[in-house]
Image (cartoon, rainbow, N blue to C red):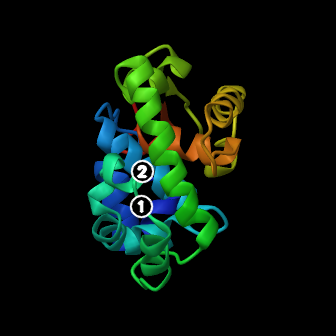
Amino acid sequence: MTRCDWSTTHPLLQEYHDTEWGVQLHDDQKLFEFLILEGAQAGLSWLTILKRREGYRQAFDHFNAEKIASYTLKKVEVLMQDDRIIRNRLKINSAIQNAQVFLAIKEKYGTFDQYIWQFVDGKPIIHQCQTMADVPVKTHVSDLMSKDLKKQGFSFVGSTICYAFMQAVGMVNDHLKGCFRSP
């Protein structure tokens, strides 16, 4: 079975590739989870985050935005000692801030899904790349998304992070030609 090259180096990457990457996601809580995990990835590999994903779920109340939005400084200090996650104060504080903004977006738009999918007019962008070198790390759409997310008050949402998020939640399908998951 042919897969995208990046997914063949570790079983966690292969499972993620085969079952999640590029699959359209419309569940608000899962979208929030990916937004937080993509921000946590900044400067690191996705494999590093996948290895800690369950630890993140446990440490961050299964990505319950209402709970995370109310985290206190005491909770931040507890998280700073939790070796199941990336112990970066800026990223932890960002998750709290992003939970607060996420809830405000849901209130304004009805769902986060409705807000975030507007950037692709509700339909995934399908690329037909031959090699990973052909896959962009950011696009005009991810630039627009990043700018708007920052305007809303989100942090750790640069254009590259936004593009990785778009790939993760199926807003973009970048499976290479020949990959069994290619559209």
Q: Do the residues labelled 1 and 2 touch (CB within 8 Å)?
A: yes
Answer left or right for 35 relative to 39. Answer: left
Residue closest to the eye, 80 or 37: 80
| Quadrant housing residue 28 | top left
Residue 71 is labelled as 1
Residue count near mark 2 (Cα–Cα under 10 Å), binned few <14, some 14–19, many ≥20: some
Point out residue 95 in the picture as x, y percentages from the top left corner. 50, 56
Residue type at mark 1: give it: Tyr
The type of residue carrying mark 2 is Ala
Rendering quarter of residue 152? top right
Please give the label number shown on residue 69.
2
Occupied quadrant, residue 61:
bottom left
- Which of 11 and 78 lies nearest the eye of the viewer? 78
Which residue is rendered at x = 49% and y = 55% of the image? 96
- In the rendering, at what x and y percent does residue 160 appear? 67, 46
Residue at horizontal 65%, vertical 33%?
Answer: 142
Q: What element carries label 1?
A: loop
